[in-house]
Amino acid sequence: MSANKDQVIRFGVVGPGRAASRFARGMSAVEGAKIAAFWGRDAERARAYAERFSVGSVAPTLDSLLSADIDAIYVATHPDTHAELCIAGIEAGKHVLCEKPAALNVAQVERVIAAAQRHDRLFMEAMKPPFFPLYRRLRAHLEADPIGAVRFVRAGHCDSSIGPDYPLHFRELGGGGILGIGPYEAFLALDWLGPVKRVQTMGRVNAAGVDSFALFQSEHERGMAQLHTGIDLLSHGDAVLSAPQGFVVIHANWWNPERASVHYVDGRVVELQEPYSAGGFNYETEHFCQLVREGRRESAVIPHELSVGMARLLEEARRELGVRFDGELR
């Protein structure tokens, strides 16, 4: 592995949607990195994105983006195309940061990882919470003033405010609450409780064929979790971590963590607050860029095994409701 601590990481961005806009906003706070090129299937939206964020080059095709003078691509499309775009980028010799979920299912995630290993490229799923200042401070605080081992996680979010054109409503895009919202909940459960052992799910599937509400309980190596997602209800969006000597509330919206309360069995309550900057995507991007500079091919924070585990939890939850995607055959 070669290292270049002064390397400026040049990104090509794929897909002009909401995530790509937040990625560009966060890039303004990342030193030694820039968006050098962009490609999207919708030429008009692609030009608008490039103008809004001062992207130097709009590629006319995906192939032209992948042959451009860039180091990495950020995949910000819908889940149905994540696997194929990640593999295309890797095979073109680019490192890949892919928006969550990394792919539709376990088999696709494993194909992406295998391609990254075969071509000696870095692949990382863009799971932002563990890089936020509050989450890191909470980890440090519990090391210094522990509540014991976390044995139960409760988390979830429902958002009925999303419009009818929002991608989560469309089965052909890999929609539904489990894949659209659930990756955050899956991450939290696996991060504190370890690999998943089994999943039980109840929920509703709407006329479009996507899960409109899901309640899934998972057993892990070190405890259990109760998680929920939905696109036709509204819920608070906080999270709870329970342990023998206390519990933690990560206040809404917990996936953009800014405030947490640590409640101890002796009655003490410690309030933690850490604001975040530039929308929050900057922290995971900084981490990814540092991995590239150090010549690393896997993140210790979001390792490949964790991405596979999140995909397994979500796939089992979704399939128990009978939600299938055509793209899973690819």
Image (cartoon, grey):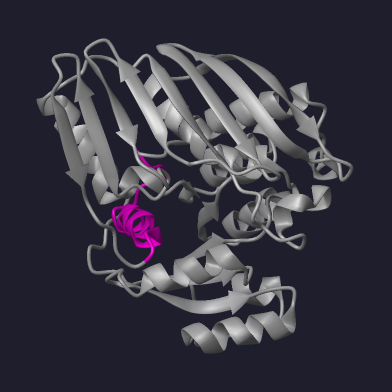
Q: Residue at x 29, y 28 (%)?
A: 248
Q: Relative to 234, say whether 37 is above or below.
A: below
Depicted 3 relative to depicted 25: above or below: above
Q: Which of 7 and 139 is in front in this view?
A: 139
Q: What stretch is highlighted in magenta?
A: 279-300
Based on the picture, tell me whether residue 298 belongs to the magenta stretch.
Answer: yes
Q: Which residue is drawn at 65% across and 37% down?
A: 178
Q: Does the magenta stretch include residue 312?
A: no
At x 28%, y 58%, the residue is 276
Q: In which quarter of the image is residue 239?
A: top left
Residue 68 in view: no
Q: Position of residue 217 (x, y in %)?
A: 58, 18
Q: Of residues 113 and 313, which is closer to you in this image?
A: 313
User: Would you identify the image quadrant in which residue 323 lies?
Assistant: top right
- Considering depth in this image, is 129 or 260 the residue closer to the camera? 260
Seen in the image, is 178 located left or right of residue 100? right
